Each structure stands twice: as C-alpha cells, then as structure tokens.
Amino acid sequence: MKYFFFILILLISNNLYSQNFATLNYEEVYSDSRAFQKYLNDIENFKTKQMNIIKKLEKNLIKERNNLDESKLIISEENYNIKINDYENNLQDYYEEIDKINNVIFNKIERGKSEISKEINLILQEIAIEDDILMIFDENNFVIAVKEIDITSKVIDKLNSRIKKLNIEE
C-alpha cells in the first residue's frame, strides 16, 4: 500500500510540473512583430538612399578613371602618377564609405533586435508569473514539443500591442 501511494504521489507531482514549461519560437516572434517589420522596411528605405549615394560615387570614379586613361598620353608621367594616386585615394574612400554604410545598417538591425528582445523578455516574465510557468525554452532547441505549451502567439499579441514603432534614427 505504501508503494501505491508513493507512485500515485510521484505521478501527480510529475503531472503538475509538466504543465509549468513553455516554448517560444523567437523567429516567429520577430517575423510577426509589426513594429520590427516596419523597422526593417525603414532600414530598407535607408539602404536604398545610401545605395543611390554609392552609385553616384561609383559613376564619378568611373568618369575619373576614363579621364585618366584619356589623358595618359597627353600629360607628363609625374602628373599622371599624381592623378593615379588621387584616384586610388578616392577609390579607397569609396570602399570605406561602403563599409561604413554596411556597419550602420548592421548596427541599426542589431539595435532593433535588441529593443524587441528586451520587450520580449519583459513579456515572458509577465506570462511566466500569470500562467505560473517555471521555465520557457526556445522552440528551436527541441526536436518535439507539444503545441499546447507554445506561447509564441501570446507573446506576439502582447508585443504588437505594446510596441507600435521602432525609431531608426539614433
């Protein structure tokens, strides 16, 4: 009889604890976050504007190179070498500008992810308290997870109601 009660208590306590876990699909949260998607669109617009600037610089470099090629026979070797050095400096500036723009875009994306991530963590804490959840796991770390413990849609709903827009400028 003692064994029966021991097994019964073990099974009941096991069932109680199994309800205190949840999973979250972060990728889905980011892709369904209206604020983050608007933010990515703003970054895409920023990127397009920057690409237009880069294209103008590129056209100027091509024009400069063509002028160099045409003037090679006309000007002295010393002047030609000076112009080649100027062109190479301009070309280096062009590559540095591209790197700078890429870094700005990368940093903007990371900053947006960080802001969303902070809010997600606050939401997860609230849900954990409200629903008496002991642990929340990233859904990507599990081979199989029961859909009943997935709180992704709940997080998305709260996130979309809290954050309307992320600011691209800073």
Image (spheres, rainbow, N blue to C red):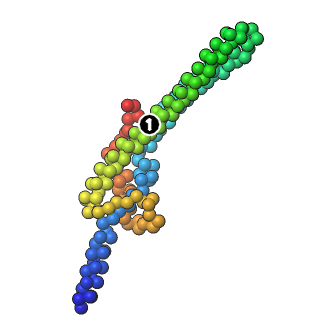
Quarter occupied by the N terminus: bottom left
Residue that badge 1 annotates: 107
Residue at the location (61% across, 16% down)?
A: 86
From the viewer's perspective, is 10 left or right of 62? left
Residue at the location (65% across, 14% down)?
A: 83
- x then y, percent, for residue 47: 51, 33
Q: Nearer the viewer, residue 68 or 13?
A: 68
From the viewer's perspective, is 91 left or right of 129? right
The answer to whether one can see residue 45 in this image is no
Task: Tell me which corner region of the image, top left, top right, bottom left or bottom right, holds residue 150.
Answer: bottom left
- x then y, percent, for residue 119: 33, 47
Q: Nearer the viewer, residue 24 or 32?
A: 24
The answer to whether one can see residue 129 in this image is yes
- x then y, percent, for residue 111: 40, 39
Considering only vertical position in the picture, is 66 above or below 31?
above
- x then y, percent, for residue 71: 72, 12
In this view, which residue lies farthest toward the bottom? 1
Residue at the location (31% across, 52% down)?
A: 123
Amino acid under label 1?
Answer: Asn
In this view, which residue lies farthest toward the right? 73
From the viewer's perspective, is 64 left or right of 43? right
Considering only vertical position in the picture, is 130 above or below 62?
below
Q: Residues within 10 Å of mark 1 (few under 14, many from 20)?
A: few
Task: Tell me which corner region of the image, top left, top right, bottom left or bottom right, holds residue 87.
Answer: top right
Considering only vertical position in the picture, is 24 above or below 14?
above
